[in-house]
Image (spheres, rainbow, N blue to C red):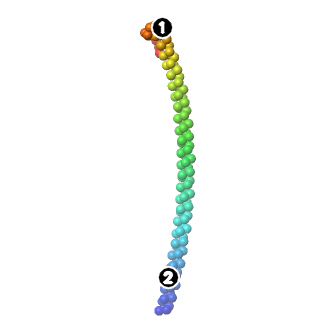
Amino acid sequence: MQRLSTSLGILTDQLAAQELQQAQESKEEAERTYAHSLSALRTIVGLALIAGVGVTIWLIRSVVVRVKEYSGFATRVRGRRAQHEDASAGKRRAHGSRLVPQRDGGSR
């Protein structure tokens, strides 16, 4: 009985040591996986931020150029309309509020 108890004690100690070793290995593997995942996450977030800033700058530059071009176009159109309206108003005053046909074929 004494030998049986001693051999069971030895087997139990060996099993406990083996389980402790497996638990430590599992913990180390989990820590490595966590560190790798965290590194990958930081890399992805960093690349996404860089891409987001790049796309934002590209869009701003594209839109600003087009807005400036349109603004210049709108200014030129408005300037032509103002000249045309001033000329028409002058003709109406000179001829009593009636429109006088233009001599150059009436093109506007």
Residue type at mark 1 is Ala
Query: Residue at horizontal 55%, vertical 54%?
Result: 42
What residue is pinned by disc 1?
A: 94
Query: Residue at horizontal 55%, vertical 68%?
Result: 28
The front one of 97 and 33 is 97
Residue 47 on image: x %, y %? 55, 49
- Front label number (2 vs 1): 1
Dots 2 and 1: beta carbons under 8 Å?
no
Q: Residues within 10 Å of mark 1 (few under 14, many from 20)?
A: few
1 w.r.t. 30: above or below: below
Q: How many marks?
A: 2
Residue furthest to the left in view is 98
Q: Earlier in the sequence, mark 2 or mark 1?
A: 2
Please indicate, yes or no, whether residue 19 appears anywhere in the rendered image. yes
What label does residue 57 carry, if any?
none
Residue 57 on image: x %, y %? 56, 40
On the picture, is 28 further left or further right than 96?
right
The front one of 14 and 86 is 86
Residue 19 on image: x %, y %? 51, 76
Query: Residue at horizontal 50%, vertical 18%?
Result: 82
45 w.r.t. 91: above or below: below
Residue 6 on image: x %, y %? 51, 88
What residue is pinned by disc 2?
A: 12
Query: Residue at horizontal 47%, vertical 92%?
Result: 1
Q: Secondary structure at mark 2?
A: helix
